[in-house]
């Protein structure tokens, strides 16, 4: 692989951002464009919830691999922040952070409310709550759709396109040298900050109003709020990676592109399935 000349950081950053922002998964995701309109059946939302739960749960493996392969203590901690928060450690400067006393069941249930769970701060000194685990929020989302714990999150529930995405996440995030995993994570977080959560929330809000009033959208609204925070973390990592002596632009850009192709497989898989199903109906 030919190495591109090392220019200044801002030029490189623009190059990476252009790559992310011009990728088809950002510019023309047919599934989220359709979903956004909210013309959804219960079956559409149920299938979406299951595939999303597989990706969301399997993402923990990718993030763990990224963490244990970190090149510096700082980047290990950055990865640990995301992983610990994902499984239920709340950020410390959250004003609604409960004290050490034993909480009532009602209080514990409210931990899944995104208005009460902060998106800023550190897991350092934060408290762990089962109900603050993001997967539990997704379980709550699945419940009014008729989905039980045994219906969500496992590889056996994933379609080949979803599993391809999970495998690409695991492969690229787990890459030992660190540079590839930084690129993959930068691509994922910046794709995520580019607006797909808002499209999902728009569609789900219509669906909720018209067909499923009890549907909690906490998982989606919370993630939409945190993405800018995550993208800022990966920018720190990008800068750090850029300073490394083994830094190679071509390797970085290639890994970011491969990761986005993995993301694309997930959404295009959902789109093909819904088109086939609606055609057959
Ligand atoms: Fe999450």
Image: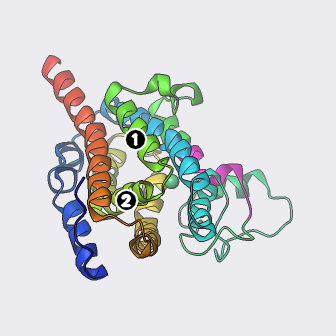
- Residue at x 19%, y 48% (from the top left corner): 29
- Residue at x 47%, y 38% (from the top left corner): 53
Depth order, front residue of 178/280: 178
In the depicted structure, whether residue 245 falls above or below residue 31:
below
Where are the magenta residues, as a range? 127-137
* Of the image marks 2 and 1, the number of the one nearer the N terminus: 2
Quadrant position of residue 80: bottom right
Find residue 28 and name its label: none
> Which residue is identified by label 1?
212
Image spot of residue 48 (x, y percent) = 35, 36
Quadrant position of residue 51: top left
| Label 2: which secondary element | helix
Q: Which secondary structure type mostly characterizes the magenta part of the structure?
A: helix
In the depicted structure, whether residue 79 falls above or below residue 274:
below
Question: Number of labelled discs?
Answer: 2
Q: Residues within 10 Å of mark 1 (few under 14, many from 20)?
A: some
Residue 202 in view, yes or no? no
Q: Is residue 200 left or right of residue 39?
A: right
Depth order, front residue of 54/118: 54
> Which residue is identified by label 2?
183
Label 2 near ligand 1 (CB < 8 Å): no
| Label 1: which secondary element | loop
Depth order, front residue of 217/212: 217
């Amino acid at each position: 692989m030919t190495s591109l000349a090392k220019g200044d950081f801002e030029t490189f950053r623009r190059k990476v951002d252009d790559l992310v922002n011009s990728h088809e998964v950002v510019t023309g995701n047919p599934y989220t464009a359709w979903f956004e309109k909210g013309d959804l059946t219960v079956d559409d939302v149920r299938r979406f919830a299951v595939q999303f739960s597989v990706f969301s749960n399997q993402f923990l493996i990718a993030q763990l691999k990224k963490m244990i392969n970190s090149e510096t203590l700082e980047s290990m901690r950055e990865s640990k922040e995301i992983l610990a928060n994902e499984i239920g450690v709340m950020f410390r400067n959250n004003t609604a952070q409960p004290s050490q006393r034993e909480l009532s069941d009602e209080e514990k249930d409210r931990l899944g409310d995104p208005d009460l769970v902060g998106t800023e701060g550190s897991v350092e000194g934060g408290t762990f709550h089962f109900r603050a685990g993001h997967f539990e929020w997704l379980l709550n989302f699945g419940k009014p759709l008729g989905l039980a714990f045994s219906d969500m999150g496992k590889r056996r529930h994933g379609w080949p396109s979803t599993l391809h995405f999970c495998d690409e996440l695991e492969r690229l995030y787990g890459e030992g040298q660190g540079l590839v995993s930084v690129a993959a994570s930068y691509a994922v977080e910046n794709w995520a900050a580019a607006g797909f959560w808002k499209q999902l929330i728009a569609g789900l809000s219509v669906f909720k109003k018209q067909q499923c009033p009890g549907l909690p959208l906490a998982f989606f609204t919370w993630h939409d709020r945190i993405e800018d925070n995550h993208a800022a973390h990966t920018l720190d990592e990008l800068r750090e990676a850029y300073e490394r002596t083994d830094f190679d632009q071509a390797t970085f850009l290639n890994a970011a592109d491969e990761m986005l192709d993995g993301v694309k497989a997930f959404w295009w898989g959902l789109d093909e399935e819904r088109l086939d199903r609606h055609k057959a109906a």
